[in-house]
Image (tube, coloured by chain):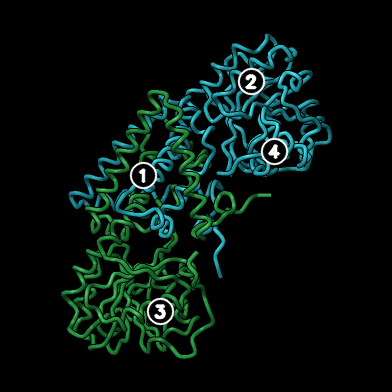
Chain colours: A green, B cyan
């Protein structure tokens, strides 16, 4: 578990005007956490979907809510892009005229190199770009799905480019630490490789097996659903994640995902061969090693120790 | 959700002498549930591991606890094999001399055709063999890991051979229904195919990706663990399941597992190709379809509706 946890709210806000572009699960969680921890004087929500904006107003998540990203960004101390990674470039372009020197721009994208390549060219001189990725989320989407403790006890990775002002990086770090996260800094390409194996390929194979199961002729969909408690249901949770977000992740982290998928496939072929040739020792050895990794994840506070993730039991 | 749920305990036990061979997660859960629901007059625990037997006695899970399976089986009304599927044949052989005509033998193996082939030849005439598979479990092992409600609201599949006495099948059905399960009957080969996709291949790819992640050179194990909340940690739960049990499952359901794995691989190749060639629509279509399957699993009561499986949140 990262050391940092939710402390008491700040006495004075970290940012005067905080603009959140995209009010889904992540954006709305930031709004809630920033409010609760007094990280921003004014919270401004921007979203191109007027229905989302109406829900944001009804939930009372922001002081202002607008579909006009340039209007939102005017006078901003910090703008955080919480849109699918494929949309970051066009949002940056749209807000460009409104950004004042000294403003900080950040994002929450699951891919960093592609987002940096798309966003940087649009930012005026004197604007600090500090890309961020909170490694947290659920399978649910929309402003109702967010909650203030989503980032508490989770890691956030920052990937600032060479030469970005240290004060801006420190401020973004303080922002996430204020929401209970622990912060690590690494290069964008390394981030994309690490996340390919810890997040992107797991999502890909979860989506894939759920698709395979749905398409069988000799096993009905009703059977798949009924007997899913044998393991399959664990995969369906992440295969229920937001389709647009994940389409963009795969298209924008192609090389790393395909590289890690290649490794996965090699290992899977070896495993299939062990099954075909009755190599029980090879299977037993792997299954023993993997158990130890689970233990470390629980010890490090990145998952619940209770069996079945602590799923509620029927009594 | 299956209709059946834990009702009040029976007024008179269903079986006089119930013998459970193998007191791990499943065996010890059956002992607890049978006791609580008054399904057996006497519960006899057999296990070849004397340490397990000592823990069974300390937990008070059975009236008798012995390492001698023949002694346990003497006078049994019902014997349930709760050992790894590769061990069922030798256990059946060992208890053969002790089994009286009219006794019911059942099991809980995740593979049915191979278990039937291994057990049937050893059973004396007049003994009824009703193979069963409760589709329930957790990633934990041992007699301490069991609990009385493990089977409540879960499905149990029976795969009796042609000609098995209906009264014996009905009794095994009543036993599982008494523990809150819903029962379905199907052929052993169909069972093995259904479970290959809903349980065995999911376990295989979970074990595999956890192994792949552990073996990378360019991403450290510490990074994998820290950033596992991006999806990877979901896989580690089932990759922490009992190594011996799962080795035996794969070796004993080889054809169906390799067939389903072939389908999985075909689909995964298509998905990799869609990523490589920027076919965002194909990705988005699949990711939308898979979301609907998750919804059905939740609607049917086979998983928790809360985000993140209802994992406890840090406040």
Q: Whole-percent x and y of residue A189?
A: 25, 61
- Residue A111 lies left or right of residue A315; in this view the side is left
Front: mark 4 or 3: 3
Q: Residue furthest top?
A: B125
**Cα gap from disc 1 to disc 2, whole angstroms:** 36 Å
Front: mark 3 or 1: 1
- Give the labeled residue for mark 3: A175
**Cα gap from disc 3 to disc 2, whole angstroms:** 61 Å
**Cα gap from disc 4 to disc 3, whole angstroms:** 51 Å
The answer for which chain carries disc 1 is B
> Can see residue B294?
no
Label 4 crowd bin: few (<14), some (14–19), many (20+), radius 10 Å? many
The answer for which chain carries disc 3 is A
Q: Regarding mark 4 in the picture, which secondary structure is present there?
A: loop
Question: First in sequence: mark 4 or mark 1?
Answer: 4
Q: Residue at x 57, y 61 (%)?
A: B312
Question: First in sequence: mark 2 or mark 4?
Answer: 2
- Residue A123 lies left or right of residue A296; in this view the side is left
Q: Regarding mark 2 in the picture, which secondary structure is present there?
A: helix
Q: Do tags 4 and 3 sit on the same chain?
A: no
């Amino acid at each position: 578990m990262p050391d940092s946890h939710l402390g008491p709210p700040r006495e004075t806000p970290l940012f005067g005007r905080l603009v959140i572009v995209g009010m889904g699960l992540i954006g709305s969680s930031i709004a809630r956490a920033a409010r609760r921890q007094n990280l921003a004087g004014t919270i401004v929500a921007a979203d191109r979907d007027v229905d989302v904006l109406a829900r944001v107003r009804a939930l009372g998540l922001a002081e202002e809510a607008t579909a006009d990203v340039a209007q939102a960004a005017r006078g901003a101390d910090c703008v955080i892009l919480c849109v699918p990674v494929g949309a970051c470039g066009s949002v940056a372009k749209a807000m460009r005229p409104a950004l004042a020197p000294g403003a900080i721009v950040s994002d929450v994208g699951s891919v960093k190199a592609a987002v940096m390549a798309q966003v940087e060219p649009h930012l005026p001189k004197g604007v600090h770009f500090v890309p961020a990725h909170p490694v947290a989320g659920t399978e649910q989407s929309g402003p109702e799905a967010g909650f203030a403790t989503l980032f508490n006890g989770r890691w956030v990775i920052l990937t600032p480019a060479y030469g970005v002002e240290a004060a801006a990086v420190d401020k973004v770090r303080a922002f996430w630490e204020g929401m209970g996260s622990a912060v690590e800094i690494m290069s964008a390409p390394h981030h994309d490789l690490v996340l390919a194996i810890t997040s992107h390929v797991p999502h890909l194979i979860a989506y894939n097996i759920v698709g395979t199961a749905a398409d069988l002729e000799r096993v009905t969909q009703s059977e798949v659903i009924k007997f899913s408690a044998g393991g399959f249901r664990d995969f369906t949770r992440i295969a229920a994640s937001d389709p647009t977000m994940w389409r963009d992740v795969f298209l924008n982290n192609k090389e790393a995902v395909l590289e890690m998928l290649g490794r996965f496939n090699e290992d899977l072929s070896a495993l299939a061969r062990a099954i075909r040739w009755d190599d029980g020792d090879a299977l037993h050895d792997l299954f023993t090693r993997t158990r130890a990794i689970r233990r470390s994840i629980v010890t490090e506070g990145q998952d619940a120790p209770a069996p079945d993730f602590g799923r509620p039991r029927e009594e």
